[in-house]
Image (cartoon, helix red, strand yellow):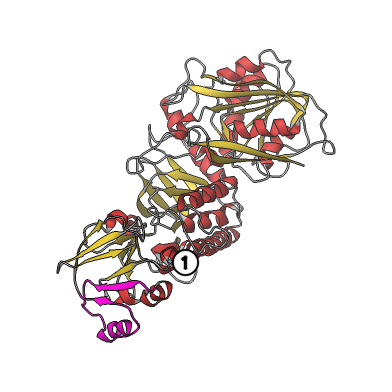
Amino acid sequence: MGHHDSDHHAHPRHEADHQHEHDHGHGPSMGRRVDVAVIGGSAAGLAGALQLARQRRSVIVVDDDSPRNAPAEHMHGYLGREGTPPAELRAIGRDEVRSYGGEVLTGRVLDVRREGDRFRVALTGGSSLLARRVLVATGITDELPDIQGLRERWGREVIHCPFCHGWEVRDRRVVQIVTTPMGLHPTPLVRHLTDRLTVVVHDATGIDPDALRTLEASGVPVVDAAVRRIADTATDTDTDTALGIELEDGTRLVANAILVGSRFHARVGMLAGVGLSATPHPSGLGETLTVDATGATAVPGVFAAGNVVDPSMQVLPSAANGSMVGAHIAFSLAHEDLAAGARPSAGEEDWDARYAEERMWSGNPNGTLVAEVSDLTPGRALDVGTGEGADALWLAEHGWTVTASDVSSRALRRLDEEAARRGVEVRTLHADANSIRPYGEERFDLVSLQYGSFPRTPEGRGLQSLLDAVAPGGTLLVVAHDLAWAQEEVDPAETTRMFDPEAFAGVAHFIAALDADGGWRVDVHETRPRPAGAVSHHHVDDVVLRAVRVGGHGPAGTRRARSTVRAAPDASTGQRRDRVEISVW
């Protein structure tokens, strides 16, 4: 678990190195260390990220929200999700990845280069990721024939895949525009779906005349003429979505849907720095990224999945492919760690890297902590995510017996050094908040979490461990940045958000868990201005939660709460808002 040191009087370096907690796409650039950087957040990328997050790997997905199927209103052939809008599937997938602590950042990858035993993944806005592995799930772009009116209707009236949209056009008037020899590949499927199919040969180059004669013999009209443009036509008795196909010879055809093939291009420009580029696809219709059966590219450590390696994959096979490749990446990391005798905590290396250089604090405690605990009788205190320890030192100097916990051993060493210099005693505990019993069996009169961040888990293990650490009559104090900025839109071409608040346990999760438990009295739950003198690039408000355990406490009598935050549309505005779902056991 990482922490923003509670001192907010620090120099700008402090905020620059800690935007993990509150950056929203502006301010100084930063670097983060991660096990796997996933480029692309559609079916393949999210499925791979989910596999890896469930293997306790730190995963960051970078997505610019430009999926191949964006124009489509629904996706088909996905067992269990038939007819689901593509955007809804992506939202569900993001929620699932985040529920295991994986992050999904809005932004764009500009460049990937080898840097020692890692890859530096450069992002818009100047920040970067240092990743042990890279999963490329960027998909492809479709290049349509140069016919006026096609692009505007792509994914709706203009389709390319009988499996994706064929059922929807059954028994309707379909005009297929053939521009390449491979264009006839789906024609037998469409002929079976409708007896009102017309084939227009826009470009006869390389097309087998016998294949056209076979179509005509089966009752399919074949028109040998170039297409000038596609236009809306008058509503008739058959349908209100009729299209007009104007041919160069002046002929005009009417259709309810147009079937046309495209050329495709793998989105791999960001991989030039590691020497990877797309190679011609056997169909002759475009280029893809070449991988082996495990999804590995020619560059060790770089993997790829989904349409970027196979343009024929629908959403379901893309997700399956991403899941398989994610599993192979997990194996590769596990074998590497086994050989090194290492078992790293998912976020420990990232936080240790931030504490590798100069100190990031002035030594002053967070003003909100001071205001909230000054009226408490000193006792035993647990400072979770202590960082360099400004809060822990202040508490110790004011009579508290302090245990300071953090996932970063480097941060704790700095705290030990400063405590020795000041002549105060603070016990340090190197622990991951999501491990089992990270604080042992001890109970504390004050448990403080100041601007901390630890990844979510479906059962809320880390959150419950904090609650369990509070003694009967003890106080829980949680202070976090107001995350209203997370609702703001950013332009991924200009900047990349470097922190995903939905992947971490937040105040909303704590409130939900307290309500579900029932053994707490919430004294403070409010958003208030940050303490005077605080340094922040954008954030002026904090969310403060102060609660007291009023019920009994103990392993036999403790009810546990599982909390899940899901994005749901607000009935009045249509905007997505967090909904917290709770179950208790």
Identify the amino acid type marked 1: Gly
Image coords of residue 202 (percent x, y): 22, 71
Q: Secondary structure at mark 1?
A: loop
Query: What residue is rendered at 34% in x and 56% in y?
Result: 241
Looking at the picture, how far across and down is residue 89, in whole percent? 51, 52
The range drawn in magenta is 195-224
- Give the residue furthest to the right: 556
Q: Is 61 displayed left or right of 249 in the figure?
A: right
Residue 218 sits inside the magenta stretch: yes
Q: Quadrant of the C terminus?
A: top right
Residue 446 left/right relative to 369 = right
* Viewer can see residue 221: yes
Of residues 56 and 155, which is closer to you in this image?
155
What residue is drawn where x is 34% and y is 67%? 174
- Give residue 267's position: percent from left, percent from top: 34, 58
Looking at the image, which residue sits at the far left?
A: 249
